Amino acid sequence: MGIKKHFHHQGIGHQLVKALEADAKQHAHYLQVKTFDEGHYPEYDQTIRFYESVGFERLEVFPTLWDAWNPCLVLVKKL
């Protein structure tokens, strides 16, 4: 799930996460997202900040899950 750049900062992402949470609470106890670890791509550093702003917490970095140049950061949120 993502928002095109020209729609950023309009609350759309927050609305999508709220809708996802409302539905997911019926089926799960946690949400998990994966993105590139911080410090590799500025646009993904913004993605991490967004996820943290809606309550996700950093869980673990998998340095070679995708490949050595793109370490995977896993973030989780308790529902």
Image (cartoon, rainbow, N blue to C red):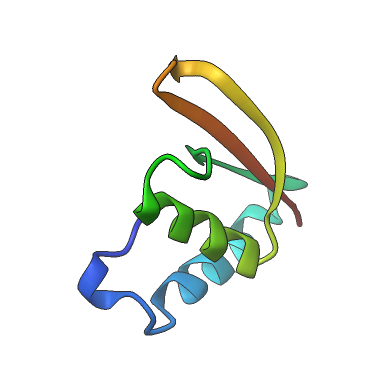
For the C terminus, the quadrant is: bottom right
Question: Residue at image x 37%, y 84%?
Answer: 10
Residue 70: x, y in percent?
A: 41, 27
Position of residue 42 in the picture relative to residue 64 (left or right): left
Residue 45: x, y in percent?
A: 47, 54
Residue 52: x, y in percent?
A: 64, 61
Point out the residue furthest to the front here: 39
| Residue 60 visible in the displayed image | yes
Q: Nearer the viewer, residue 27 or 67?
A: 67
Q: Nearer the viewer, residue 34 or 71?
A: 71
Q: Is residue 15 above or below residue 10?
A: above
Position of residue 52 in the picture relative to residue 48 (left or right): right
The total number of labels drawn is: 0
| Residue 1 visible in the displayed image | no
The quarter holding residue 26 reads bottom right
Question: Residue at image x 39%, y 81%?
Answer: 9
Question: Residue at image x 64%, y 44%?
Answer: 75
Q: Nearer the viewer, residue 63 or 9?
A: 63
Residue 44: x, y in percent?
A: 41, 50
Question: Residue at image x 53%, y 68%?
Answer: 19
Q: Nearer the viewer, residue 50 or 14?
A: 50
The quarter holding residue 18 reads bottom right
